[in-house]
Image: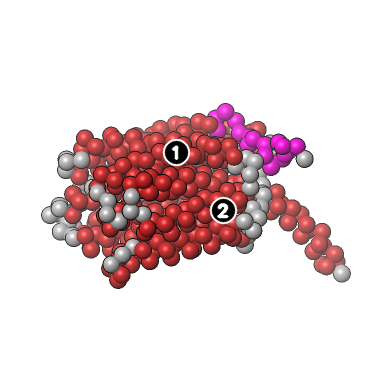
Amino acid sequence: MSLFSKSARFAVGSWYGWVMVVVAALAMLATLPGRTHGLGMITERLLGDPAFGINQVAYGDINLWATLIGGLFCLPCGWLIDRFGLRITLTVTVAALAAVVLWMTKLSGSRPLFLAILLTRGFGQSALSVISITMVGKWFRGRVSLQMAVYSTLVAVGFGQAFREAAPLKDADWRVLWGSIGWAVGGFAVLAAILARDPREEAPVAASIEQPVSGFTLGQAMKTPAFWLFGLSISFIALIGAGISLFNESVLKQQGFSNDIYYKLGEIGPRIGLATQIPVGLLARYVRLNWLQGVGLALLGACLMWLPSIHTEREVWIYAVGTGVSGGITTVLFFTVWSQAYGRKHLGQIQAVAQMLTVLFSALGPKFFAETFARTGSYTLIFQTMAVIVLGLAGLSLFVRVPSPEEAEDSRTADGPATAPALEG
């Protein structure tokens, strides 16, 4: 077998597929107002707004239930993508998110605020995220790790730029900042309507007669161990990430570090992840995805187990490198595996369920971290528990086989001749 075997060939797609990579990255950037990091920009100002009269506990409950219920938006979105295509689903979803964000600036009272946050979570963090990560997989077949690595890099750079653009408004009324974000998302809705295309319109090469669109149904995919391995792995990572993101400063203070280390760590970790993604995307063309997943999870598990013992600045930087590399690996693999393993035919529905899992787990992360600290006075137990789970998933990764889209077609073909004689007999 040559080095460039069938499984290691470059994915096929028309030149417009690379335009869609950029559009997909912009779509993920547009999810900002529906994400914890986006809402975090205005949290303190919301709590201080007399129009709402809520405290941190009430806001935490609002955020938890809005995230959990909003996660259900993933399911119909996946079906809509497969039924009506990317262009219509993307444009309508982005326009709805923009309308909700702008509407939120006119509100008063905790109940309307809950509804607004629920809808931003639903349209942004859930539905629009599903559309974004599905777009690249729909436009390319085969190994899409390089395209997904470029996509995830653009997303990371875009979020960083968004925070820099928002910095001058850090002391302004939250409605000014939120209104600016809403109009920016609305502008992208117009751009999406112009630029977004479905692969059947622009990429006949990617779906030629010789190589028709194939793939698993959602039910078939969910019966494979690989679906649950990758789905639960990224979900636990989302849980850990949400908890650490919210309490990172507290965690480092408990280890004896100042706020300066907290902010430096916030800069270094993402940069390391960015530097990792393109090499991982290239490597994933030749190395089994489950093996790479095992490496990324093992590295994360080791870092989590070690974190409560870190007490020097040098150890913090080692931890930052380890988690940054792990994050780069697992991010690329999460974006890559669904289309590569299960095909493009029902990709929207499959990625919708995977995304919903991550949303639900991320909603629980801060709650688990807060409860652990309240009951034990430390985060050590939650880190050790998560480390054991992640290391267990890393071990399982070595033994789980990643399927290919053709297997779904082969199984249906094999079932036909097998059932015919039984009916005739």
Q: Residue at x 29, y 45 (%)?
A: 261
Residue 104 appears in view: no
Secondary element at image label 2: helix
Observer-nearest of 316 and 133: 316
Drawn side of residue 270 relative to residue 168, left or right: right
Which residue is disc 1 drawn over? 274
Q: Tell which residue pokes out farthest to the right in this image.
A: 425
Secondary element at image label 1: helix
Vertical relation: 162 (above or below) 214:
above
Q: Tell which residue pokes out farthest to the top in this image.
A: 15
Q: Tell which residue pokes out farthest to the bottom in this image.
A: 375
Q: Picture quarter containing residue 181?
A: top left
Do callouts 1 and 2 mark residues in contact (Cβ within 8 Å)?
A: no
Task: Point out the stretch of residues depicted in magenta.
Answer: 2-17
Residue 294 has which mark? 2
Q: Amino acid at mark 1?
A: Leu
Observer-nearest of 92 and 264: 264
Q: Amino acid at mark 2?
A: Gly
Give coordinates of residue 93: x percent, y percent. Answer: 41, 45
Drawn side of residue 290 relative to residue 134, left or right: right
